[in-house]
Image: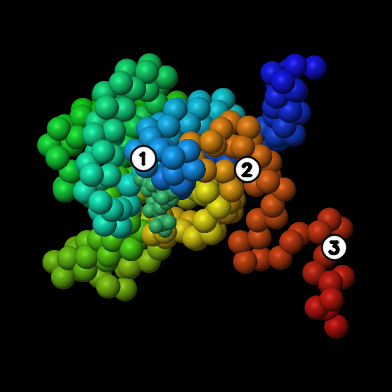
Amino acid sequence: MSLGKIIDKKYNDLSRRIDMQKVPEHIAIIMDGNGRWAAKKGLPRSFGHKSGVSVLKEILKASKKLGCKVLTVYAFSTENWTRPIEEVNYLINLFCEVLKNEIEEIHQESIKLKFIGDLTPFPENLKKIIYSSESLTKNNNTFLLNVCLNYGGRQEIVKVAKELALKSSSGEIKPSEVNEELFNSELLTQGIKDPELLIRTSGEKRISNFLLWQLAYSEIYISDVLWPDFNEFEFLKAIIDYQSRNRRFGGIESLPNESFEDSQYSS
Ligand code: IPE
Ligand code: IPE
Ligand code: MG
């Protein structure tokens, strides 16, 4: 069997194991490992960032094919400004280029594009293309792609606290009315269901200030693969792993035919 056929077979075997009824509606991804991927090849870090773009396209297509509805990707964190200015500038230019090149196809695919984070510090040319992309795709309803840019989970929570404090001091709400629902309504992700699954590539086992509120009960899948090497095959592995989890949300696993009275807690 040729190598191509072996890969096809492995892919088909994997996709057959997916339960299409249990595909997460919302998947969040920390696309990590670009710099290490480039360094391993003796290349500048920028090569890793550039290579990561086609991976995002592949994963976006794969998510749509599976029937997932929302993908939220971490592209630039509030802490990434601490990187060398050359790398930050490279990333900003890359975001501009990618948006310019891809927006037509994104729109044709009926994908709604939304940017999450504080866009204020970015240069005007990037902000302009971001706003026009969001406006062009605002009525698309097949799929939602959230790109987190200059995003930090703590900053988002502080922003919500400030909004609620302001509303409270102006008398619009009472402090006693502050609850999870109200808090949710001020988040940058308001109206979007929390992710059922978080994928982080490159083997790092941390959240790095991503969606701190929204990930409260998400299943976490860590892939050792560096983002530029990640692909549909690895993505399917993450979905299959997710589908094997028992999501308890603080409760207990419901076992068939076991009533509360039968359990160890009855006297
Ligand atoms: C993720 O890859 C992309 C961004 C943070 C923009 P990194 O650039 O963090 O790559 P590593 O983790 O240094 O390998
Ligand atoms: C998280 O990755 C941010 C993005 C992927 C955009 P980092 O590489 O910045 O996170 P740390 O520094 O490893 O925690
Ligand atoms: Mg990293």
Identified by mark 1, the residue type is Pro
Q: Disc 1 to disc 3, how far (Cα)?
A: 59 Å
Nearer-N-terminus badge (1/2) = 1
State the residue position of label 2: 238
Mark nearest the camera among 1 and 3 is 1
Q: Nearer the viewer, residue 202 or 222?
A: 202
- Residue 164: image quadrant is bottom left
Mark nearest the camera among 1 and 2 is 1
- Residue 120 shows in the view: yes
SS at mark 3 in the image: loop
Identified by mark 2, the residue type is Ala
- Residue 146 shows in the view: no
Which residue occupies 70% across, 35% down? 19
Q: Is residue 261 above or below residue 241?
A: below
Mark 1: few/some/many CA within 10 Å (<14, 14-19, 20+): some
Q: Nearer the viewer, residue 178 or 189?
A: 189
Nearer-N-terminus badge (2/3) = 2
Position in image of residue 9 (x %, y %): 75, 23
State the residue position of label 3: 258
State the residue position of label 1: 44
Circle number at residue 172: none
Which residue occupies 26% across, 38% down? 90
Q: Nearer the viewer, residue 165 or 171?
A: 165
Check whether the beta carbons of the residues at disc 1 and disc 2 lie within 8 A of each other: no
Q: Is residue 172 shown left or right of residue 95?
A: left
Mark 3: few/some/many CA within 10 Å (<14, 14-19, 20+): few
Position in image of residue 259 (x %, y %): 82, 65
Instruction: Please name the colour scheme applied to the rendered image.
Output: rainbow
Q: Disc 2 to disc 3, how far (Cα)?
A: 31 Å
SS at mark 1 in the image: loop
